[in-house]
Image (spheres, rainbow, N blue to C red):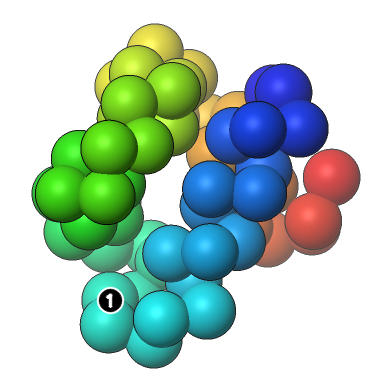
Amino acid sequence: MTDTVKEQILAIRATGVANTFDVYAVQRLAFERYFFESVCYIEDDRAGYVHFILTGE
């Protein structure tokens, strides 16, 4: 996971619009904000995304 993806995911989390475990909602919000790196990352490595949400690593 790149620093850009981390920043984008944290920005989406900070909005409070969606539960971060609702992967599809997070991807939709990322797409609407032109965070295409995050959309692709979540699609390609869902386990890594969940690991980041749970641990911050």
Q: Is residue 56 above or below residue 8?
A: below
Q: Is residue 24 visible?
A: no
Task: Reply above or below: 12 against 41.
Answer: below
- In the displayed image of the protein, which residue is found farthest to the right? 57
Across and down, in percent, residue 4 comes to 65, 33
Q: Which residue is mark 1?
A: 18
**Image location (x, y in percent) of residue 54:** 68, 60
User: Where residue 49 appears, x then y in whole percent?
Assistant: 54, 39
Amino acid type at mark 1: Ala
Relative to the observer, which residue lies in front, 32 or 17?
32
The picture places residue 20, in percent across and down from the top left corner, at 41, 66
**Residue pictured at 27% horizontal, 37% vertical:** 34
Q: State the residue lying farthest toward the top.
A: 44
Q: How many marks?
A: 1
Judge whether residue 52 can be spotted in this image: yes
Would you say 56 lies left or right of 23 here? right
On screen, 10 above or below 27? below
Task: Please identify the quadrant where the N terminus is shown.
Answer: top right
Residue sitting at 22 percent across and 56 percent down?
Answer: 29
Q: Quadrant of residue 51?
A: top right
Quarter of the rendering containing residue 10: bottom right
Which of 12/56 is in front?
12
- The quarter of the rendered structure image containing the C terminus is top right
